[in-house]
Image (cartoon, rainbow, N blue to C red):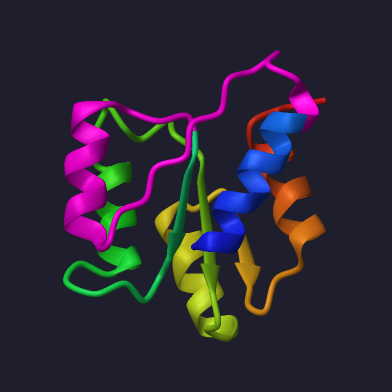
Amino acid sequence: MEMYGYVLKKLAGELKGRIPIDVHFAADGHEALARLWQNPFDLIMLDLYMPVMDGFALIERIRGEDRLKHIPVLAISAGGEDTQARALGLGVNSYLRKPVRFAQVMETVKQLLEIR
């Protein structure tokens, strides 16, 4: 989580305030869903193997809610091809397999947020 937060803070620095970026963390899928209901975000980055409510269940909930289904989802996981296929089938916009590189995460976030 620290690396992903660092990537987003680095991106905010590159943008020099053109686009505000706030980073929020959730310990599990239930907490993430509660935060999304309070304040829908512009991007969701998640690990598929979170405790309590895993990322697969969270994606299903997000994609099933009109208020949330438009939010791009970036799934990051150590899972193999089956995991990737399942995540993409549930509607994630992008999937990165661990270990991920800093530049890979940065470029994917830029693409999902349509930052040029």
Outermost top residue: 18
Residue 105: x and y, percent? 70, 55
Q: Nearer the viewer, residue 62 or 24?
A: 24
Placement of 112 over or under 60, stated as above or below: above
95 relative position to 72: left or right: right
Placement of 98 over or under 57, stated as above or below: below
Placement of 115 over or under 24, stated as above or below: above
Q: Going 67% across and 50% down the picture, which residue do you hit?
A: 7
88 relative position to 18: left or right: left
Q: Going 31% across and 72% down the picture, which residue do you hit?
A: 50
24 relative position to 72: left or right: left
Q: Nearer the viewer, residue 29 or 83?
A: 29
Residue 71: x and y, percent? 44, 34
Q: For residue 96, which quarter of the picture? A: bottom right
Number of marks drawn = 0
Q: Nearer the viewer, residue 111 or 103?
A: 103
Q: Going 83% across and 25% down the picture, which residue do you hit?
A: 116
Magenta stretch contains residue 91: no
Q: For residue 100, which quarter of the picture? A: bottom right
Q: Going 45% across and 71% down the picture, which residue do you hit?
A: 86
Residue range (magenta): 14-42
Residue 31: x and y, percent? 19, 52
Magenta stretch contains residue 15: yes
